[in-house]
């Protein structure tokens, strides 16, 4: 927020409701970014129905650019091609990702995970003080960015391959990952005032890739990747070094099949390979 002019964003902080967004209706029409600095506190401080309304509203705004809430007393309409950034702890994300966020909401986000190293944790106070002293020579305004960015055809195959890899690592559909990658590439090009995507934008995607793995469930992406390569459950368990992990592997595979990441019509004999047959005595 310190880098960009305030016309780009609205700081929602961590204690808002959807009704409170009424005051920003004019700004939403301009396509601002809605900043939620502490989504952990937001989710913890709200009743279930309020959480549901926040999640539903953001899901519809991000996908359709419009959210309508109506009951017998009132009607609330929010419109705008908005974006949003949420900060949330790994523990809270793990708690809410299936029960509350669900697939339709989570797939609209590029979710990156970052765990500070011991050296970074030890040096945190010094880093925090150094960050406070950073000053920017002017803020980025609308006039400093490209308004429209094209993606040359030569990048289509690269985007498809990256989207497949992102899909395995995040357990999101390949189509959703493709949209996220295109959006990130276009945004990076626009901020560099370029009207066309270049290899610099591809490099950014490659820099993001290591942060897609959820540290609370680090094997899920590998399981999906190895399953897509044709490995059986037993082979996958050996590959990730978890020999007693069959049930968890089956659960991840089933989830990936339900989300369309893996083909549910995989060969039935895939998990029966190398399993010794029992001798059956005829009577």
Image: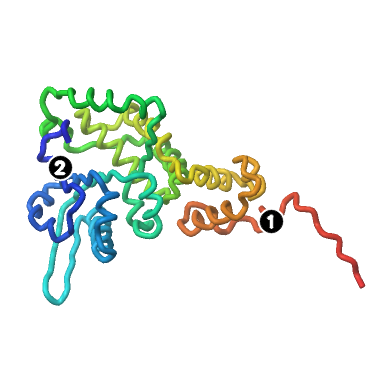
Q: Which mark is residue 152?
A: none
Image-based side of 131 in relation to 175, left or right? left
Q: Residue at x 14, y 40 (%)?
A: 8
Which type of secondary structure does the marked residue at label 2 adopt?
strand
At x 45%, y 49%, the residue is 171
In the image, is residue 74 above or below residue 106? below
* Quadrant (top left, top right, bottom left, bottom right) of the N terminus: top left
Left/right placement of residue 211 relative to residue 86 reads right
Instruction: Return the residue at label 2.
Output: 9
Whole-percent x, y for residue 12 in the image: 17, 48
Element carrying mark 1: helix
Marks 2 and 1 sit apart, C-alpha to C-alpha, by 53 Å
Residue 252: image x %, image y %? Answer: 53, 53
- Which residue occupies the extreme bottom position in the image? 72
Q: Who's the residue at 11% across and 71% down the image?
A: 74
Give the residue pinned by disc 1.
269
Label 2 crowd (10 A; few <14 / some 14-19 / many >=20): many
């Amino acid at each position: 927020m310190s880098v960009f002019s305030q016309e780009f964003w609205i700081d929602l902080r961590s204690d808002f409701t959807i009704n409170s967004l009424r005051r920003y209706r004019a700004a939403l029409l301009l396509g601002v970014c809605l900043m939620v600095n502490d989504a952990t506190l937001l989710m913890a401080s709200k009743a279930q129905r309020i959480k549901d309304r926040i999640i539903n509203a953001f899901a519809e705004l991000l996908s359709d650019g419009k959210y309508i809430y109506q009951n017998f007393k009132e009607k609330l309409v929010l419109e705008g091609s908005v974006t949003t950034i949420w900060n949330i702890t790994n523990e809270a994300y793990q708690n809410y990702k299936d029960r509350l966020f669900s697939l339709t909401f989570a797939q609209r986000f590029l979710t990156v995970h970052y765990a500070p190293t011991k050296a970074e944790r030890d040096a945190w106070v010094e880093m925090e003080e150094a960050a406070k002293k950073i000053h920017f020579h002017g803020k980025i305004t609308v006039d400093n960015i490209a308004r429209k960015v094209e993606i040359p055809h030569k990048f289509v195959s690269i985007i498809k391959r990256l989207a497949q890899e992102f899909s395995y690592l995040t357990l999101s559909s390949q189509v959703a990952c493709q949209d996220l990658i295109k959006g990130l590439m276009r945004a990076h090009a626009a901020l560099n005032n370029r009207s066309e995507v270049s290899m610099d934008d591809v490099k950014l995607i490659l820099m993001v890739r290591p942060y897609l793995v959820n540290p609370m469930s680090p094997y899920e992406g590998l399981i999906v990747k190895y399953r897509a390569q044709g490995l059986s459950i037993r082979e996958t368990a050996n590959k990730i070094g978890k020999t007693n992990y069959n049930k968890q592997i089956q659960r991840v595979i089933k989830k990936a099949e339900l989300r369309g990441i893996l083909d549910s019509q995989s060969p039935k004999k895939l998990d029966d390979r190398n399993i010794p047959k029992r001798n059956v005595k005829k009577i």
